Image (spheres, helix red, strand yellow):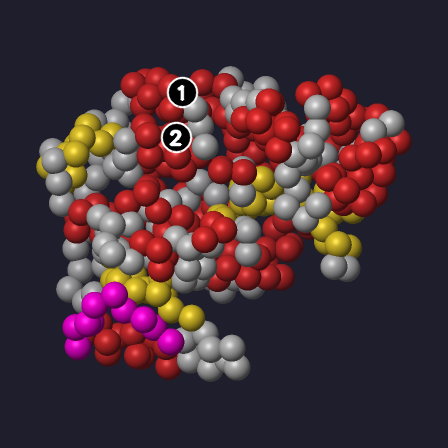
Amino acid sequence: MKLTWDQVLRWRLHRHHLAATRAKDPIAAARRLSGLHAQVAASAVTATDLRVAKAVTATTIDKLLYDDRTLVRTWAARGTLHLLPAADLPIWVAAMSTRTRESTASWLRYNGVTADQMKDILAAIPDVLGAKPLTRVELADAIIDATGHKGLHERLTQGFGTMLKPAAFRGLLSSGPPRGRNVTFVAPRKWLPKASWGVDTDEAVDTLAEAYLGAYGPATPEGFARWFDLRPALAKKSFARLAGPTVEVDGVPMKAPADGIDPPTWKTPVVRLLPAFDPYTVGSTGQLEQIGADGHKADVSRPQGWISPVLVVDGWIRGTWAVPDRGGRPVVTPFAPLTAKVRKILDADVTSG
């Protein structure tokens, strides 16, 4: 089967619940998108609200995270914060257990820690962290008390959580309810007592690969490896095990999901203003020049990993946008002149908020 990018992007827009259909709730949206990027909390709320039938607010997300415990916030794909369905966390942990970067000499040297110190930290966390939330400082103090590594306090409490990510990848910690302005951490196995742990690694990788294809496909194993931060060899083996057909997109062979791709059609352009770090954009950063941002990749994928808010028309990334410092209507910067019909839809959307 041969597909054009126009067909692929219409299908992706539909699969992302950004066209005619909406997800029933944030859990369903997070599962469909293989996680909701949560590096910026407000963007995660907006991205979810765009895709769910009922209005979603920060309060909605907090309730699901900390009262219902049906969502979980943790470091996942590419080592970035995501909102995941709590029931799916064991699958993610099994797949993330394949990560080896955090045990390499270069990673250890860059982060000023030895292999033995990291081993001690990971061994201590299950003993000091449970269902009771601990702040970053409280967790660091508890780890140091257990290990005696007093010199690691600054590293354990730094804002990006670099030293704690390996524990998250192993399912030893995830986010707990904030305490004022302080983040907290809990042990998922205690915080989520209904979760079923012990998932087979290959099965987990295949499950996430199929889910990835269902939202970001068709794709190559290299694309999946880059998106997840998985070893390329494991991605290739997983794609070989999957039942999905191979399709061509402008002459490039790619794997499609098992149920194939049926591009939808619509008469009126679908115009969306997506927030910073929206999953649709993040999942397409390796294809920006093919899907509308040719010559403008640096405007979308910016330094320090910042992913800009974008204008999307029928799945194509057609520009960026921002809200002025003093507030007001979003200012859209298109990559090329927009049609009169798109401008009319966009103006109505911006005016209505």
Q: Nearer the viewer, residue 349 or 221?
A: 221
For the residues marked 2 and 1, what is the alpha-carbon distance in whole angstroms?
Answer: 8 Å
Q: Which numbered disc flags the more N-terminal residue, 2 or 1?
A: 2
Quadrant for the N terminus, please: top left
What residue does disc 1 label? 234
Q: Nearer the viewer, residue 242 or 40?
A: 40
Q: Residue at x 83, y 29 (%)?
A: 149
Amino acid type of the residue that numbered disc 2 sits on in the rendered structure? Ala
The location of residue 292, given as percent across then percent down, is 23, 56
- 10 Å crowding of disc 1: few (<14), some (14-19), many (20+): some
- SS of the residue at dot 2? helix
Q: Look at the image and say whether residue 36 sits in the magenta stretch.
A: no
In the rendered structure, which segment of residues is drawn in magenta?
331-340
Q: Residue at x 32, y 43 (%)?
A: 286
Write down the quadrant of residue 107 in the picture: top right
Q: Look at the image and say whether residue 336 sits in the magenta stretch.
A: yes
The location of residue 44, given as percent across then percent down, is 51, 56
The location of residue 58, given as percent across then percent down, is 59, 61
Q: Residue at x 77, y 59 (%)?
A: 180
Numbered mark located on residue 275 in the image: none
What residue does disc 2 label? 225
The location of residue 264, given as percent across then percent down, is 19, 51
Asked if 336 appears above or below 93 in the picture, the reply is below
The answer to whether residue 52 is seen in the rendering is: no
Asked if 344 appears above or below 45 in the picture, the reply is below
Q: Residue at x 45, y 20 (%)?
A: 203
- SS of the residue at dot 1? helix
Say whether marks 2 and 1 touch (CB < 8 Å). Answer: yes
Asked if 63 appears above or below 34 in the picture, the reply is below
Q: Nearer the viewer, residue 337 or 349?
A: 337
